[in-house]
Image (cartoon, rainbow, N blue to C red):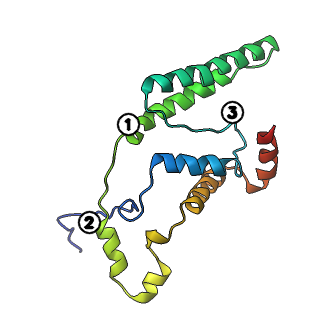
Amino acid sequence: MCSRPKEVPVYNLTASAVKKMTWKEVLDIGRKIIYDYPFEMTVWYPDGNIRASKFMHNMCVIFLHFLPAYLIDFLMLIFFQKPFMVHIHKRIQNGLLLLQYFTTRRWVFHSSKFLALGEDGNQVDKDLFSIDFSQVIEEQYLKDCLLGGRQYCMKEPLSSLPRCRRILKV
């Protein structure tokens, strides 16, 4: 029977030591690719901005999200339809509040053990399992993340992309 090690080795898989990326860079790339690969259930034009002031952020949430949502829901009621926009925006706001702690702080992950894996091993393993983050193209990486989220998390087929693009252009 195997004995357990005294310490469990931890390998942080992060590229931040090799290739740094700011939230602004992520959002700039995201704004560019979301129009090429929109989601089926888009209820508003995609944007994504960073504001340094919490007050300005809250003003934008009120005037650009909640007031239009209440107006649309009011119109839905007038036409005897079920209102849904306020509910959606409350869920989005709750999700953003959960992420706020992680997105408004600086996080440093040490990946020296993981990077050492790239130096150890034979050449065949290095060729098959490349961990050279300096070769990563950020836009392609984020596009792959978006398409993966769209296809595997949201269960949206890639075949719906042309229709989604047409709807977003309206």
Name the quarter where the N terminus is drawn: bottom left
Residue 13 at what x, y percent from top left? Answer: 38, 62
Q: Residue at x 54, y 65 (%)?
A: 137
Tell me the kind of residue under disc 2: Pro
Residue 21: name its quadrant: bottom left
Q: Earlier in the sequence, mark 1 or mark 2?
A: 2
Q: Earlier in the sequence, mark 1 or mark 3?
A: 3
Distance in Å between CA atoms under marks 1 and 2: 27 Å
Image vertical order of residue 133 relative to residue 21, above or below: below
Q: Element type at marker 3?
A: loop
Tell me the kind of residue under disc 3: Trp
Residue where numbered disc 1 is placed: 101
Q: Residue at x 44, y 73 (%)?
A: 132
Q: Residue at x 77, y 17 (%)?
A: 76
Residue toward you, 115 or 49: 49
Whether residue 160 can be seen here: no
Which label sits on residue 9?
Answer: 2
Residue 53: name its quadrant: top left
Image vertical order of residue 127 relative to residue 45, above or below: below
Residue where numbered disc 3 is placed: 44
Residue 74 at what x, y percent from top left? Answer: 72, 13
* Residue 11 falls left or right of residue 129: left
* Residue 63 falls left or right of residue 99: right
Label 3: few (<14), some (14–19) or many (≥20) C-alpha neighbours in 10 Å = few
Q: Element type at marker 1?
A: helix
